[in-house]
């Protein structure tokens, strides 16, 4: 009788459930141990909820910034009125957010169970090392109080992360909040202080500003989005300030406390700022505690992230890890790919190691910032020799028609071959516009090939082809100079 590989997956986020689907398709016996519901933080408290909230904010931003220019007259205020003519019922918005998150989790659960995967609701942990037959024990503390022991030939850890908290700014779920708690608000914050100017902080600051809150963004760095392209971050910060946001650069928050129906945030230089609510967006901590990692021989970094190689193996034989708990790149798409790669590798199927230079990502602010491949920082530090062209959207005819003033397309290509190695789009719906550049990077297309592909006229994507044409001309000119 042929042995069926037993796989236990601890964690039901994108890394876990996508791995389960692949493993089931390849004939393995798969069990997922999950405590909160399939989809994980990505579906229940992070990506799906935040982007649903942002969808409402996008409508508000588009309306507020463009209705006068496009000739739209609403209510009695007319096009010359400065009064806000539309508003938001945050309670209704948040109820929709939660409803869609639960529905998405339910859909994932149905897909996984139809594939033959067993679901156990509880907390799983590794029990010691390998047995003589190479299997491992997994102890599951079920939510009903019972304990169950599983034997696994392969274990995948996909436990995600949770919001980091400052010792002197403990969230209370009412006035001082993490990003998992904002969906319990029934009324829009009058004055929201957002601490942290990374992706999460910038997205929520922009969203609540658009919904009607007065927002202060506290950034410990020189600019918002310190990990993104500097030109893109500058555009976004300028937009934030122009729309009335108070962006406090080089300002580190040390404490936050409730004072009646207000929140006081104390900065490291002694200044105190006051708002009605405070959102703490100061990073994440991996969920690696209580998994029995030390006893199982699974190594972690100083930050607590589980160390993995490019095929998702940990330091312990038969144990893999995927997703945010590995600290590789905190994206749902990367988590899912890590999980799939782990299963392909464990089950002996063809597999290619994870290649982060083909990963496209997006910051869901307004405008959005989408990136793929090598960046300006990679070029500046000598990691990649590339030629760059940046094309502002203000010259694009469709952007003019839509009242889009901010944003650009930036492409990077190799100086000799013209192969596209990276790109950035800053624009409304940049997440949709980055795909042709992703295809170019993934398939080693040249700027000539990108430039010669037909685009619709007029279209914002036409700027991608135009940037490629300009790169072609510049590459030829630089080649002539060097000859």
Image: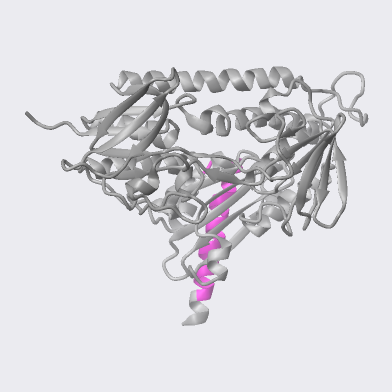
Q: Which quadrant holds residue 217?
A: top right
Q: Quadrant of the N terminus?
A: top left
Residue 80 part of the magenta-drawn span: no
Q: Is residue 12 above or below residue 330?
A: above
Of 99 and 446, nearer the camera is: 99
Most distant residue in the left direction:
1
Query: Is residue 367 among what the camera can see?
Result: no
How did the renderer colour the structure?
Answer: one colour
Q: Which quadrant holds residue 430?
A: top right
Expressed as whole percent of the image width and height from the top left, the position of residue 329 reads 49, 49
What is the span of residues highlighted in magenta in the rendered image? 455-478
| Left or right position of 41 against 316 | right
Q: Which quadrant holds residue 32?
A: top left
| Left or right position of 79 against 389 | right
The kind of secondary structure the magenta stretch mainly shows is helix
Q: Residue at x 67, y 22 (%)?
A: 94
| Left or right position of 140 against 4 | right
Query: Is residue 268 among what the camera can see?
Result: yes
Give the total number of marks visible in the rendering: 0
Of 365 and 340, nearer the camera is: 340
Q: Residue at x 53, y 32 (%)?
A: 41
Of 164 and 478, nearer the camera is: 164
Of 35 and 236, nearer the camera is: 35
Expressed as whole percent of the image width and height from the top left, the position of residue 194 reads 75, 42
Q: Is residue 250 above or below residue 84?
A: below
Expressed as whole percent of the image width and height from the top left, the position of residue 68 reads 84, 32
Q: Is residue 199 above or below residue 59?
A: below
């Amino acid at each position: 009788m042929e042995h069926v590989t037993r796989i236990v997956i601890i964690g039901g986020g994108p890394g876990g459930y996508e791995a389960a689907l692949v493993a089931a398709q390849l004939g393995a016996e798969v069990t997922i141990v999950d405590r909160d519901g399939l989809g994980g933080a990505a579906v229940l408290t992070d990506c799906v909820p935040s982007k649903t909230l942002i969808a409402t904010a996008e409508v508000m931003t588009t309306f507020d910034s463009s209705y006068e220019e496009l000739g739209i007259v609403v209510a009695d205020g007319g096009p010359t009125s400065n009064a806000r003519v539309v508003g938001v019922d945050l309670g209704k918005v948040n109820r929709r957010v939660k409803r869609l998150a639960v529905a998405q989790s339910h859909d994932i659960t149905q897909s996984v169970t139809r594939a033959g995967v067993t679901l156990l609701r509880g907390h799983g942990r590794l029990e010691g090392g390998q047995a003589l037959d190479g299997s491992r024990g997994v102890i599951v503390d079920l939510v009903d109080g019972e304990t169950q022991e599983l034997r696994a030939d392969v274990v995948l850890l996909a436990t995600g992360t949770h919001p980091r908290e400052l010792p002197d700014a403990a969230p209370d779920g009412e006035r001082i909040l993490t990003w998992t708690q904002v969906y319990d608000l029934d009324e829009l914050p009058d004055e929201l202080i957002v601490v942290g100017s990374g992706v999460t902080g910038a997205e929520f600051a922009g969203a609540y500003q658009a919904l009607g809150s007065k927002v202060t963004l506290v950034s410990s760095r020189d600019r918002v989005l310190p990990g993104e392209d500097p030109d893109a971050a500058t555009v976004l910060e300028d937009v934030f300030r122009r729309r009335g946001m108070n962006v406090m650069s080089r300002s580190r928050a040390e404490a936050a406390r409730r004072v009646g129906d207000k929140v006081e945030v104390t900065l490291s230089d002694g200044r105190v700022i006051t708002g009605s609510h405070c959102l703490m967006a100061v990073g994440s901590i991996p969920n690696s505690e209580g998994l029995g990692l030390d006893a199982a021989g699974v190594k972690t970094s100083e930050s607590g992230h589980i160390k993995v190689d490019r095929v998702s193996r940990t330091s312990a034989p038969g144990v893999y890890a995927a997703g945010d708990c590995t600290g590789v790149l905190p994206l749902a798409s990367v988590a899912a790919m890590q999980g799939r790669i782990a299963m392909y590798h464990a089950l002996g199927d063809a597999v290619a190691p994870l290649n982060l230079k083909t990963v496209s990502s997006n910051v869901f602010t307004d405008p959005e910032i989408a990136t793929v491949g090598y960046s300006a920082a990679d070029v500046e530090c000598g990691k990649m020799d590339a030629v760059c062209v940046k094309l502002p959207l203000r010259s694009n005819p469709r952007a003019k028609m839509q009242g889009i003033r901010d944003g650009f397309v930036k492409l990077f290509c190799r100086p000799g071959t013209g192969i596209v190695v990276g790109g950035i789009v800053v624009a409304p719906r940049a997440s949709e516009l980055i795909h042709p550049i992703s295809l170019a990077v993934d398939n080693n297309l040249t700027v000539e090939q990108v430039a010669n592909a037909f685009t619709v006229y007029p279209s914002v994507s036409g700027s991608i082809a135009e940037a490629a044409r300009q790169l072609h001309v510049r590459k030829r000119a630089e080649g002539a100079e060097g000859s």
